Image (cartoon, grey):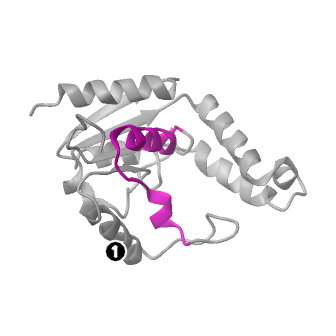
């Protein structure tokens, strides 16, 4: 563990494409602790990835085991709808939000990097899946509480007993890391 590393279990969430995994990895590396991503528990491993949802009970069991394997961790990704039993373990929750157009651009670029431009273009092997994913992701800011949306996350925050740090806007990873470290330092002992 890094020197002076705070004894916090940190959960980072936001819309797909907001940077939760990137920030989670960076923060975990800086603090010298494991990084866990909710997608690793939500989805069964498939090729291509993100095709088959794992049963809720199995997700919960696997995440419980992973969280129990280390006293301190950084967990990124949304748990709404299946992760309520883990709320009690959070010491700090970080919520990321970036403007819609930027987020959608990031997602488009990520899909190209994952699958190649030909796969997501019309007629490509991943075009229909790409279109469905982008439509789903685009609904985050205006979606209702029944889907992964800002409204769902805001409602979920009402159950969170620890501090929720809101980091909104187009910020670099170093800026986000600095904001999280400042929040950690401001935390009452």
Look at the image and tell me whether residue 168 can be seen: no
**Most foreground residue, 168 or 39:** 39
Q: Report the predominant secondary structure element of the magenta stretch.
A: helix
Horizontal relation, residue 97 to residue 111: left or right: left
Q: Quadrant of the N terminus?
A: top left
Q: Which residue is mark 1?
A: 61
Reply above or below: 58 against 157.
below
Residue 86 image point, x, y percent = 26, 60
Q: Which residues are magenta?
A: 18-44
Residue at (45, 76) in percent of width and height: 55
Reply above or below: 29 against 80.
above
Look at the image and tell me whether residue 10 can be seen: yes
Q: Specify whether residue 24 is painted magenta.
A: yes
Residue at (63, 30) in percent of width and height: 101
Q: How crowded is the residue under tag 1: few (<14 C-alpha within 10 Å), some, or many (20+)? A: few
Q: Residue at the right extreme?
A: 123
Horizontal relation, residue 48 to residue 168: left or right: right
Reply above or below: 155 against 44.
above
Q: Specify whether residue 189 is painted magenta.
A: no
Horizontal relation, residue 144 to residue 153: left or right: right
Residue at (73, 54) in percent of width and height: 130
Residue 89 image point, x, y percent = 21, 55
């Amino acid at each position: 563990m890094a020197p002076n590393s705070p004894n916090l279990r940190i959960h980072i969430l936001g819309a797909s494409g907001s940077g939760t995994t990137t920030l989670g990895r960076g923060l975990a590396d800086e603090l010298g602790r494991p990084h866990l991503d909710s997608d690793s528990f939500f989805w069964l491993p498939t090729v291509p990835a993100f095709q088959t949802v794992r049963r809720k009970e199995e997700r919960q069991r696997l995440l419980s085991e992973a969280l129990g394997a280390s006293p301190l961790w950084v967990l990124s990704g949304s748990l709404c709808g299946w992760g309520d039993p883990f709320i009690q373990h959070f010491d700090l929750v970080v919520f990321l939000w970036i403007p819609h157009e930027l987020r959608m651009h990031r997602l488009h670029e990520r899909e190209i990097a994952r699958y190649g431009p030909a796969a997501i273009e019309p007629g490509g092997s991943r075009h229909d899946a790409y279109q469905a994913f982008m439509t789903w992701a685009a609904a985050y800011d205006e979606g209702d509480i029944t889907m992964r949306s800002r409204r769902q996350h805001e409602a979920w925050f009402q159950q969170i007993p620890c501090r929720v740090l809101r980091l909104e806007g187009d910020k670099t990873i170093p800026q986000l890391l600095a904001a999280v470290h400042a929040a950690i330092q401001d935390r009452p002992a």
